Image (cartoon, rainbow, N blue to C red):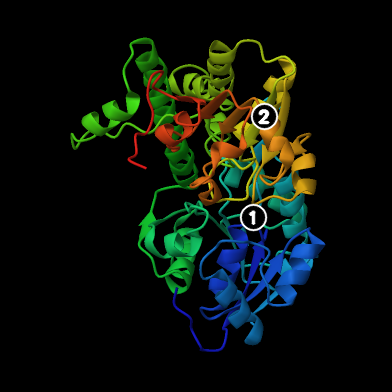
Amino acid sequence: MRIDQNPPTSTVAVVGLGKIGLPLAAIFANNGYHVVGADINHDVVASVNQGKTHINNEPGLDELIATAHKNNTLSATTATAEAVAEADTIVVIVPVLTDDQNQTDYHMIDHAVADIAKGIKEDSLVIFETTLPPGDSENRFGKKIEDISGLRPGQDFFLAYSPERVYSNRIIHDLKHYPKVIGGINEKSLKHASTFYQKTLGCELIEVSSLQTAEFSKVAECVYRDVNIALANELAMFAEKKGVNMAEVLSASNSQPYSNIHSPGIGVGGHCIPIYPYFFINKGLSEGLTPLSRKINDSMAGYAITRIEQQIGSLSDKTILILGLSYRGNVKEPTKSTALMLIDQLKEKGAHPFVNDPLFSDRDIRQYDATPLSLNDRRCSEMDVVILQAFHEAYRDLDFSQFTNCQLVLDGRNQLNKNAISRLGIKYAEIGNKGGGRLDSN
């Protein structure tokens, strides 16, 4: 990402300094703007004000934060309204999740928007980057800002929406290379937002006709992925019934240019795919592929447990090690992780689940009502089953010989070496192949 040595010309408030908000703030601060980041987490604010990042494994972020700190172009505060009062542009990247009933949970962003409304000044540009249900930028948040501040969106302040579209561990790369979709409440808002992103990111811009179109486009991306993963999981389960190796099917089918069947797995997690389809479902898309795909993907943890029971019988009093609390490999993020479903369902079966994850402390793991287990712990020899849930790099060459009591390894990501495990006298199972596995020469 370009680093501009020219003095900052105006101020940006970035509301929310999480895994996407902080990289955005750092990039803006290195490209001609003074940036004030706002976050409710005092530790996050303190680290930013020391020129440090709380986000690990994000290439290039440390350098950007350190440079901005040195140049006095990036600071942070817990006082959102005060940060907004200083700013000409406000970028909002506060999470919107779902609750236990899969209803949209607005409490964090509603609080942030109320604070924004208390500090906003006339002619400011407000851009929402948080993934939102279509219509919310204008009808919920634009209206809330107007009700509190008295300023009208599109007339007294500019309002735009531009969804984040990045991937953890490559956010800075993606911000530079992915096209930026932008919608505005009117043409002036759209042009103001486009000019801002052209100056700060320099990436391709895709201007769409409305706020709602931009909002819809981001949710549609996630629904596409969820539906295709559900299709892969459905085909994998059917392949098992028919004695077919799904990995071979993928290799053969995807050699056709128009076929892109995704890989099956033990489940889908994270902030995006398990959550954002409900933004459509809760707005009225209650039938069809979107809700069906959610059911299929959420059922995979239970399906995996059934596979284990078919292999070793009752799970009552069995000790089971889950490899990976995170929802995917090499990322420290437990939101909606399949590991959490596995823990709950294994306990219902009377089993004793343990969790290992090199990215989390024992204290972190205990917060999810799970028992942590180091791979150096002697109790590894007592495990009856091992489940690979997130394929961290640390597990690539894991020595399974320490699991001397292990009856079965369930490879939930289809990544482990069947031969190496089978030679130890341990049964091996994967998703989409009842009789096979990855056959390596070693």
Q: CA distance from mark 1 to mark 2?
A: 62 Å
Answer few, some or many: residues within 10 Å of disc 2's Cα (few below 14, many 20 plus, some between 14 and 19).
many
Residue name at image x 71 percent, y 28 percent = 353
Q: Horizontal and vertical percent for residue 148?
A: 77, 52
Name the residue tied to disc 2: 383
Tally of marks: 2
Name the residue tied to disc 1: 152
Q: Identify the mark nearer the N-term, 1 or 2.
A: 1
Hey, what amino acid is under mark 1?
Arg
Q: Are marks 1 and 2 in contact (CB under 8 Å)?
A: no
Q: Horizontal and vertical percent for residue 277?
A: 52, 31
The one of 168 and 115 positioned closer to us in this rendering? 168
- Provide the secondary structure element on which disc 2 rests: loop
The one of 105 and 157 positioned closer to us in this rendering? 105
- Provide the secondary structure element on which disc 1 rests: loop
Residue name at image x 39 percent, y 21 percent = 433
Residue name at image x 47 percent, y 59 percent = 170
Hey, what amino acid is under mark 2?
Met
Residue name at image x 71 percent, y 71 percent = 48
Q: Horizontal and vertical percent for residue 439?
A: 34, 34
Question: Taking 50 as reference, is 333 left or right?
Answer: left
Work out which quarter of the rendered image holds the C terminus and state it. top left
Q: Horizontal and vertical percent for residue 252?
A: 22, 30
- Is residue 21 visible to the viewer in this orientation of the structure? yes
Image mark for residue 256: none
- Is residue 104 visible to the viewer in this orientation of the structure? no
Q: Residue furthest left?
A: 256
The one of 196 and 260 positioned closer to us in this rendering? 260
